Image: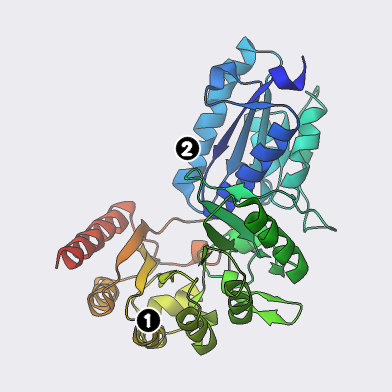
Amino acid sequence: MENAQKKFVIKTYGCQMNVNESGKIAELLTREGFERTNDDKSADIIVFNTCCVRDTAEKKIEAHIGNTKILKKQNKGLVVAVIGCMTQKNGAAESLKKKFPHIDIILGTHNIDKLVSYIKEGRRPKTFIEILAERKGSDEILTTTIDQDGQTAYINITYGCENFCSYCIVPFVRGKLISRPFADIEREFDEILRAGVAKRIVFLGQNVNAYEGSGYDFPKLLRYFNDKEGEFSLNFLSSHPKDFGDELISAIKDCEKVEKNIHLPLQSGCDKILKLMNRRYTVSEYETKINALRVACPEVHITTDIICGFPTETEVDFAETLETMRRIKFNAAFVFPYSRRSGTVADKLDGQLPLKVKRERATKLIKLLQDLSKA
């Protein structure tokens, strides 16, 4: 069967980084003559680009992988590939192989750019697994990912994370923080501008504002690209408050092309919980940054993330988070019940709360946010 006759489906779970990487893989497969489809039954290749940030995500992914067993019986040539964060966890790849022996390819987070070549090799008599401990050499996927809106392009400027928040599995599955060479970022940026494929460009990284490369820190990088000629806007995801300082606030203020829409995860409005989370800032320090940002940019739109029901969180602790949210008055917030992740520090903490309590607190916080929004 020629590539042009083969069809592929990519199922993406998790953050914008995963969406970006799925877009790159889709573009490379298309260049090889494969055709994209949304119909699993007509697909010759099904790729699962996975997330493991929350337990509910993993369970959903496993259910979807299990459903492909029937499709495999109907189409003997179907290739099923599982990649990304979920497979990178210790023992996860072997567990998937044992649970779903019909999977053909399992790759981790450090070599997903090799997926296309492995798919082109065809089906194997047994599951092929390659999980690397770290990135090796230049493994960039040299394509530009454009969002479905046809207006937004995404550029990875960092990979990995070294913050080791106690609840988060990302540093263990994405590896240490790596800043891409400045020259590579500029080349990709200039290609986007020349092609005229997007009016909005977003810099991506698990800790995007920790960028350090070729003499450029993140504020300096924003200023440099803001001065590029052309009609476009700039934004970035995701930031860590500890790296959100005066220089970055000044750059956001001064750069007319940088959007005044900032997402800055707080995670908890209680100092005791922030310390247990290993977030490395206090509520007061966070609020000082927010206030400085609002003074510099009165029009700024600020969103955040909050985790409810972290281990040992009491009603008094949660009440502090509610009060913090009332004071800061975010434009919007993404609220999540705490999800245990094996391998993290928080998973081993005493004082794990019942799911019912976590959900009740999340519901109460969402209600508060809705009331604040209406006001």
**Front residue of this view, candidates 359 and 35:** 35
Q: Nearer the viewer, residue 46 or 251?
A: 251
Q: Where is residue 147 in the image (x, y as percent from the top left)?
A: 52, 47
Task: Pick whichever of labels 1 and 2 is earlier in the sequence.
Answer: 2
Q: Is residue 103 left or right of residue 60?
A: right
Query: In which quadrant is the N terminus drawn?
Result: top right
Q: Determine whether, in the image, residue 321 is placed left or right of residue 83.
A: left
Task: Say few, some or many: other residues with alpha carbon within 10 Å of mark 2 (under 14 / 14 to 19 / 20 or more).
Answer: few
Query: Farthest residue in the top direction?
Result: 74
In this view, the mark in front (1 or 2): 1
Which colouring convention does the figure follow?
Answer: rainbow
Image position, residue 93 (x, y; %): 69, 41
Residue shown at 57%/23% (left/top)?
68
Residues at marks 1 and 2, CA–CA distance in whole angstroms:
41 Å
Q: Name the residue under label 1.
A: 297
Badge 1 crowding class, 10 Å Cα cut-off, few under 14, some 14 to 19, many 20 or more, is some
Quadrant assignment, res 28: top right
The three-letter code of the residue at mark 2 reads Lys
Going by the numbered disc 1, the residue's amino acid type is Cys
Residue 52 vertical placement versus 321 (above, below): above
**Number of numbered tags placed on the structure image:** 2
Q: In which quarter of the image is residue 50?
A: top right
Q: Residue at x 79, y 34 (%)?
A: 118
Which residue sits at x=55%, y=53%? 198
Residue 141, horizontal then vertical, whole percent: 74, 49
Observer able to see residue 280: no
Residue at 61% x, 21% y is 43
Residue that badge 2 annotates: 60
Q: In this view, does 271 lie above or below 186?
A: below
Residue 224: image quadrant is: bottom right
